[in-house]
Amino acid sequence: MLPPAIQATSVGEADIRSDFSLVDHTGRAVTEADFAGRWQLVFFGFTHCPDICPTTLAYMASVLNLLGSKVEQVAPLFITVDPVRDTVPVMAEYVSAFHPRLIGLTGTEAQVADATESFRTWYERVEEETAPDGYMMAHAGHVYLMRPDGRFETVFQERDQPPEAVAQQILMHIQEREDR
């Protein structure tokens, strides 16, 4: 006889929050307060990433394009996990290749570590002889949707649903907020 199935339950909210002090791709110091009142679409990665980052940023760009006029209510943020290589000029060039609204964020190693901690995400430097500068950055591939007050709403992964589904969900949240 099999033991009874364990029923998982959840209570409360995930302790994921938009809390950072970084520098944007134009060289301006920013915090989460600079994006208050807008939904944040946040992805952590690095510019030397050979696959997940460019694919996910292209996916985010598709989502942004699908938002139409409501795109103004969303701050799309790409936060580097490789601040040693991802300087302000590098970030500026990189984000411009994906979408004109995409905001690249970098900072010191400590600032980036603090940002990843607030979002409860991970990254790790992995030595790899054949990679640029001899290393890669392993990292999570989540795209966070944060509410206009900086609290966690949900998380997406590019491989799990088409950009149309993500855009529709964001538009639904925007509409719900406008209806209040």
Image (tube, helix red, strand yellow):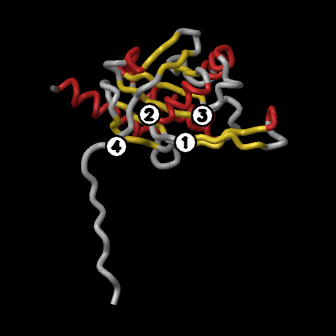
Quadrant in the picture for residue 165: top left
Q: Would residue 125 appear left or right of 176 to someone viewing this image?
A: right
Q: Nearer the viewer, mark 3 or mark 1?
A: 1
Q: Compute the Cα span from label 1 to label 2.
A: 11 Å
Residue that mark 4 sits on: 14
Vertical placement of 85 versus 166: above or below? above
The residue under label 3 is which amino acid type?
Answer: Gly
Residue wearing tag 3: 45
**How many circles with numbers are drawn on the protein?**
4
- At horizontal 56% and vertical 32% (from top left) the residue drawn is 57
Name the element at disc 4: loop
Q: Is residue 157 left or right of residue 153?
A: right
Q: In this orientation, which residue lies closer to the viewer: 143 or 18?
A: 18
Check residue 122 in the rendering and tell me which mark sits there, or answer none: 1
| Residue 16 falls in image quadrant | top left
Q: Is tag 1's residue or tag 4's residue first in the polypeptide sequence?
A: 4
Dot 3 or dot 1, earlier in sequence: 3
Circle 2 residue: 118
Q: Amino acid at mark 4?
A: Ala
Neighbor class of circle 4 (other Cα within 10 Å; few <14, some 14-19, many 20+) is few
73 over 27 or under it: above or below: below
Give the structural element (helix, strand or loop) at label 3: strand
Q: Residue at x 33, y 90 (%)?
A: 1
